[in-house]
């Protein structure tokens, strides 16, 4: 996941787990090929039922803020993850791959250009 190459504060457990899973994917692809292909889906922020318990206004704000920070300007949907999994299952010449399906999270700029004091206002 994105926390392996771009860890965040208080994300050490997730960053190390993501790194381990990515390494395991590549190692198993070597060990199990050509009989089996081994790939990994690295999902980005996805709007699922895990947020249904939240206050509607707070949830909307969280989703909008996250979407605004991503290059594709939207959060993922379960269908996006399904399409990525389908690709990994159907691409016969793909193995040892970690597929980031994250709307560009792995390349996003964290600072909002409108409020970033390091950017010119001109």
Image (tube, grey):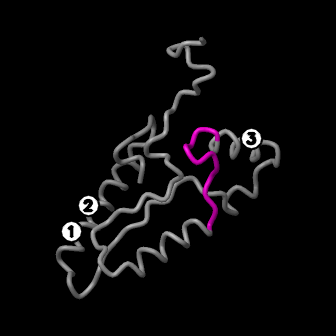
The part of the chain drawn in magenta is 68-78
Q: Secondary structure at mark 2?
A: helix
Q: Secondary structure at mark 3?
A: helix
Name the residue rendered at 18%, 73% in the picture: 30
Q: Secondary structure at mark 1?
A: helix
Residue carrying label 3: 61
On screen, 20 above or below 26? above
Q: What x and y, as percent, mark residue 77?
A: 64, 62
Dividing the picture into quadrants, the one containing residue 49 is: bottom right
On screen, 96 above or below 58? below
Name the quarter where the C terminus is drawn. Answer: top right
Name the residue rendered at 43%, 65% in the picture: 41
Residue carrying label 2: 23
Left or right: residue 10 compared with residue 38: right
Is there CB contact under 8 Å for labels 1 and 2? yes
Q: How far apart are the alpha carbons under marks 3 and 1?
A: 40 Å
User: In the displayed image of the protein, which residue is found farthest to the front?
Assistant: 122
Q: Residues within 10 Å of mark 2 (few under 14, many from 20)?
A: some
Question: Sequence order check: which comes first, mark 3 or mark 2?
Answer: 2
Q: How far apart are the alpha carbons under marks 3 and 2?
A: 35 Å
């Amino acid at each position: 996941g994105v926390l392996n190459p771009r860890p965040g504060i208080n994300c050490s457990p997730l960053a190390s787990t993501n790194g381990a899973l990515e390494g395991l994917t590549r190692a198993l692809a070597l060990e199990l090929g050509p009989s089996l292909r081994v790939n990994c889906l690295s999902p980005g922020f996805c709007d699922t039922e895990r947020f249904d318990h939240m206050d509607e206004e707070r949830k909307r704000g969280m989703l909008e803020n996250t979407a605004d920070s991503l290059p594709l300007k939207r959060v993922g949907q379960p269908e996006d993850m399904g399409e990525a999994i389908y690709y990994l299952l159907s691409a016969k010449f793909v193995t040892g791959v970690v597929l980031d399906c994250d709307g560009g999270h792995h390349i996003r700029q964290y600072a909002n250009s409108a409020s970033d004091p390091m950017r010119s206002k001109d």
